[in-house]
Image (tube, helix red, strand yellow):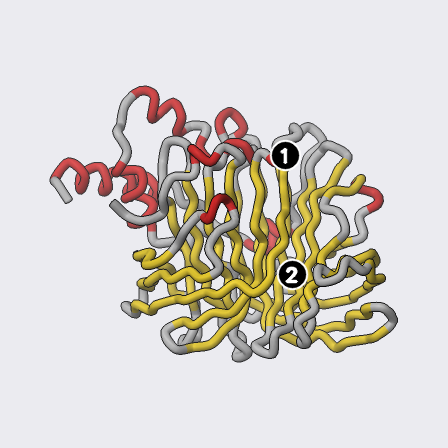
């Protein structure tokens, strides 16, 4: 890389490091939408658990001051039945999914009473669950624990001019709301324990799990495309790889892993070996080399087995919310394989490095 690029990278890295603020997960877990928050301010929670035997329980709930709530719920049985929620938007007071923080920074209770659709035959299946999430590791905050070299590289690649810095103030949908509703995103490794009842048949839920919490402005039509991989082993380990393209800055990446370790190590570099947009479906098999702060580089191969299309904002942006298997440097795992796409395919761009 040339000298100008290296200087821009150092400037961005310095600014990001300087902007770090203390992070308190217990305080952030109790974050609520204030009454004055506009319709684009989002408070969302994701919880997902998986086992190598093929079972998955995955859910997301997002609150906005619109009177409506965004939801998806996925349950995959050990036998391979793939069931998904019948619709993905409800009036807030009618939500079949409820999440309650019982111990900030540590424990949550998840409950569901609704209908899931069997994707194989369309059968509508009554389902309830009562599941407790308990953290097993401290949270990983993208804006506090990440290695900022990768983010700085993304900004340093772009042409710096008046338009770039003007757009920068709106990046990730913050803009004028930046101080009043600061962006927040963190994830945490844990476990699920509880009972799920599907069509009258009870199943004991016990699996490695992870959660994330996002708060701040979320304008779906602002995003171009993203990839989010979240893999879990039966030993309680989790690996995350995330990358996003925005209109003015591409290939912002972050992630972490505690596989073979007793703590999380952040992602410091990546190299996508195999990925294709597949006309907005995303590829069933993806290969990416991930380098972490412990000095290890591992090849991550994900293979999608099941998928739910989840449109947002009238379809301006949509997820291919998949589940599947992972090989992480020889370690076997299962988890979420999420690809996001803007309706305008000309905006997707590439995730491969130049």
Q: Answer with mark 2 or mark 1, whichever residue precedes in sequence.
A: 2
The residue at which mark 2 appears reads as: 58
Q: Residue furthest right?
A: 200
Q: Residue at x 41, y 75 (%)?
A: 261
The residue at which mark 1 appears reads as: 313
- Quarter the C terminus occupies: top left
- Indicate left or right for 225 with 195 as reference: left
Judge whether 282 appears above or below 192 on screen.
above
Q: Is disc 1 surrounded by few (<14), some (14 to 19) or many (20+) residues within 10 Å?
A: few
Judge whether 84 appears above or below 331 on screen.
above
The answer to whether residue 109 shows anywhere in this view is no
Q: Residue at x 30, y 57 (%)?
A: 271
Q: Residue at x 48, y 27 (%)?
A: 175
Q: Position of residue 200 (x, y in %)?
A: 87, 71
Q: Residue furthest left?
A: 3
Secondary structure type for disc 1: helix
């Amino acid at each position: 890389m040339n000298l100008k690029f290296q200087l821009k990278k150092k400037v961005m890295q310095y600014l990001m490091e300087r902007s770090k603020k203390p992070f308190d997960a217990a305080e952030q877990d109790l974050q609520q939408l204030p009454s004055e928050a506009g319709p684009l301010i989002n408070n969302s929670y994701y919880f997902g658990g998986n086992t190598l035997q093929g079972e998955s329980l995955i859910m997301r709930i997002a609150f906005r001051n619109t009177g409506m709530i965004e939801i998806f719920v996925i349950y995959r049985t050990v036998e391979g039945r793939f069931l998904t929620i019948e619709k993905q938007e409800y009036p807030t007071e009618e939500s079949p999914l409820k999440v309650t923080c019982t111990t900030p920074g540590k424990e949550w209770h998840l409950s569901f009473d609704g209908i899931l659709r069997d994707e194989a035959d369309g059968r509508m299946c009554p389902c309830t669950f009562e599941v407790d999430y308990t953290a097993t590791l401290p949270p990983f905050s993208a804006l506090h624990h990440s290695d900022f070299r990768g983010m700085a590289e993304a900004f340093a690649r772009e042409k710096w001019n008046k338009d770039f810095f003007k757009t920068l103030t709106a990046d990730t949908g913050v803009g004028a709301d930046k101080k009043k509703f600061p962006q927040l995103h963190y994830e945490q490794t844990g476990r699920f324990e509880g009972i799920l009842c599907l069509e009258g048949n009870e199943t004991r839920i016990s699996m490695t799990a992870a959660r994330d919490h996002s708060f701040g402005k979320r304008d779906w039509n602002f995003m171009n495309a993203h990839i989010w991989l979240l893999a879990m082993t039966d030993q309680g380990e989790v690996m995350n790889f995330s990358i996003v393209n925005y209109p003015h800055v591409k290939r912002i990446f972050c992630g972490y892993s505690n596989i073979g370790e007793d703590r999380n190590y952040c992602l410091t570099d990546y190299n996508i070996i195999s990925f294709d947009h597949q006309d907005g479906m995303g590829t069933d098999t993806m290969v990416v080399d991930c380098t972490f702060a412990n000095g290890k580089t591992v090849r991550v191969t994900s293979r999608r087995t099941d998928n739910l299309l989840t449109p947002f904002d009238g379809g301006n942006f949509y997820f291919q919310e998949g589940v599947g298997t992972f090989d992480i440097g020889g370690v076997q795992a299962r988890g979420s394989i999420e690809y996001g796409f803007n309706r305008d395919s000309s905006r997707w761009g590439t995730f491969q490095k130049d």
